[in-house]
Amino acid sequence: MTKNRTLICTFLALLSGLSGGYIAGQIAITLHTQKCQNQPWGLKEMCNALVTPGAVWQGSTTGLWTGTVLGAFVGGLVTRQNRQ
């Protein structure tokens, strides 16, 4: 039972971390590129190109850590043994 519990918790933590990293990266890109909306077309594209890598890095690392911790927590709750 211990092997299965460890595998389930690890799988849920990794899956949750990766999906959290992707989602948080997309949200960060959306929020950071809103700063470029008031620029003319050429400057807007340059602003987006400069802002996007930092936004992806910041959002994806935050989402990865948060998702991994929450996924491991949920995996532990799902696989806990009932005490009588």
Image (spheres, rainbow, N blue to C red):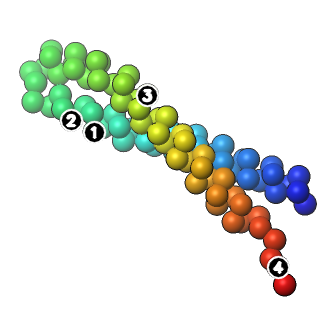
Return the residue at label 3: 57
Q: Sequence order check: which comes first, mark 4 or mark 1?
A: 1
Residue 73, image x and y in percent?
A: 64, 58
Q: Sequence order check: which comes first, mark 2 or mark 3?
A: 2
Q: Quadrant of residue 52?
A: top left
Q: Nearer the viewer, mark 4 or mark 2?
A: 4
Q: Nearer the viewer, mark 4 or mark 3?
A: 4
Residue name at image x 47 percent, y 39 percent: 62
Return the residue at label 4: 83
Amino acid beneath label 2: Gln
Q: Which mark is drawn over residue 31?
A: 1
Return the residue at label 2: 34
Q: Sequence order check: which comes first, mark 4 or mark 2?
A: 2
Q: Give the class, few, some or many, for how many residues have Cα within 10 Å of label 1's Cα (few <14, many ≥20).
A: few
The N terminus, quarter of image:
bottom right
Q: Sequence order check: which comes first, mark 1 or mark 3?
A: 1
